[in-house]
Image (cartoon, grey):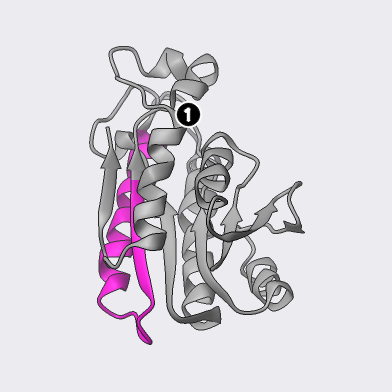
Amino acid sequence: MKIIVIGASGTIGKAVVEELGQRHDIVTAGRNSGQYQVRIEDSSSVAALFERTGPVDGVVVAAGDLHFGTLADMTPEQFRIGLDSKLMGQVHVALAAQHALKDGGSITLTSGIVGHQPIRHGVNASTVNLAVEGFVRGAAIEMTRGVRINLVDPTLLTESLPQYGEYFHGFETAEGRRVALAYARSVDGAENGRTYRVW
């Protein structure tokens, strides 16, 4: 199958490309890297991506920015970072993909553990992750042509400890290769509207 991985150069994306690449034709995409460049915050950029790739069997989104900071100091502009990028960016991809994918194709989006286990400085992430989960649950019952949509909800990746570890004291991490298996279940499986938690 031909699978687009958006955010392929990121920590999760690399692990997903390695896992899925064992048996699928992977098309890599990202803001500044990959075979195709795409800004998921821009719906026209997302539409152009699918026009360039042609019909595909699946799309995985492992991309999207969030804002980490204290609630007391947060501005509306900072809060919109996660809304515009990780939430609406993934919604843009799903809305376009439902029409661009081949019959029986799959869409896999990404949330994160702080949607259910909040942390200090993580209110933007908690809000966005739960919103993405709600979108997937709602969208799943309206998908047509056998297209499926699922969500991967990972804990902090072991490989991301140097960058984000200060926010996640007491949390168990998961290696990228283990998280990537959840994406494989979504792409290669038959379930729809499922959240795969890797905690």
Verify whether residue 137 appears in magenta.
yes
Name the quadrant of the N terminus.
bottom right
- Relative image position of residue 27 (x, y in whole percent): 66, 60
- State which quadrant residue 10 falls in: top right
User: Does residue 170 appear to the left or right of 180 in the view shown?
Assistant: left
Q: Residue at x 56, y 43 (%)?
A: 18
- Relative image position of residue 55 (x, y in whole percent): 61, 79
Residue density around tag 1, few if under 14, some if 14–19, many if 20 or more, within 10 Å:
many
Secondary element at tag 1? loop
Q: For the residue marked with disc 1, what is the amino acid? A: Phe
User: Does residue 160 appear to the left or right of 35 in the view shown?
Assistant: left
Residue 87, compared with residue 75, is above or below; it is below
- Relative image position of residue 192 (x, y in whole percent): 27, 67
102 or 121, which is in the foreground?
102
68 or 25, which is in the foreground?
25
Residue 111, compared with residue 98, is above or below; it is above
**Type of secondary structure dominating the magenta stretch:** helix
Residue 150, compared with residue 114, is above or below; it is below
- Relative image position of residue 125 (x, y in whole percent): 40, 38
The magenta segment is 123-152
The residue at which mark 1 appears reads as 68
Q: Residue at x 36, y 58 (%)?
A: 186
How many numbered tags mark residues here?
1
User: Does residue 70 appear to the left or right of 195 in the view shown?
Assistant: right
Farthest residue, direction front: 23
Name the quadrant of the C terminus.
top left
Verify whether residue 179 appears in magenta.
no
